[in-house]
Image (cartoon, rainbow, N blue to C red):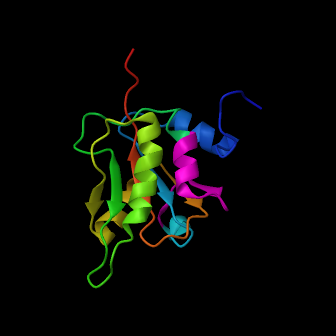
Amino acid sequence: MLRGIDPVVSPELLDVLFRMGHGDEIVLADAFFPGDTFGKRVIRADGIRIPQLLKGILPLITLDSYVDSPLIMMQPVEGDELDMSVENAYRKAIDETWPDTPAIDRTERFAFYDRAREAYAIVMTGEISKYGNIILKKGVINR
């Protein structure tokens, strides 16, 4: 056991975060996401909601400051409505560590899937909120 690391960050997830380079992306996917279909590396975090994971992950990495937004979520399909409390909960968790991060960008469903296919890893969570997936783009640690 290591000190200062939230227990929601499993050894496997910690290893992935360590091995990711700047510009690499990780998908925190809801429980319904086709992670095994899209992912090169799939990590299980069953039963853990995404705001909890964000609180555990974000103190360990930086977010990419060289892009318009290092945070990407899926746009709703025509006819669907977003539950903004989902994004608000994510933003609250993000702002605890990185309050100056730009707004979350939204991308079309199939473009999100294409991006997930290219992601360094996909973390399958216990999140059950519709449109609850989020991509984080890792940055560089400024010394």
Q: Is residue 32 left or right of residue 77?
A: right
Coordinates of residue 44 in the picture (x, y in percent): 64, 57
Q: Residue lying at the far right in this picture: please name it.
A: 1
If the image is split into quadrants, where does the N terminus sit? top right
Q: Residue lying at the far top in this picture: please name it.
A: 143
Q: Classify residue 69 by image quadrant.
A: top left
Coordinates of residue 73 in the picture (x, y in percent): 35, 60
Q: Residue visible at 33% across and 81% down?
A: 80
Residue closest to the eye, 37 or 83? 83
Coordinates of residue 72 in the picture (x, y in percent): 33, 54
Inspect this view and state whether residue 51 appears. Answer: yes
Q: Classify residue 6 by image quadrant.
A: top right
Q: Residue lying at the far bottom in this picture: please name it.
A: 79
Q: Residue visible at 47% across and 64% down?
A: 38
Q: Is residue 79 left or right of residue 12?
A: left
Q: Classify residue 138 by image quadrant.
A: top left
Inspect this view and state whether residue 116 appears. Answer: no
Residue closest to the eye, 53 or 112? 53
Residue closest to the eye, 89 or 66? 89
Question: In the rendered picture of this protein, how many numbered marks are placed on residues?
Answer: 0
In magenta segment, residue 48 = yes
If the image is split into quadrants, where does the C terminus sit? top left
Q: Residue visible at 44% across and 53% down?
A: 90
Q: Residue visible at 39% across and 54% down?
A: 118
State the extent of the magenta-drawn residues as a range. Answer: 38-56
Coordinates of residue 100 in the picture (x, y in percent): 31, 35
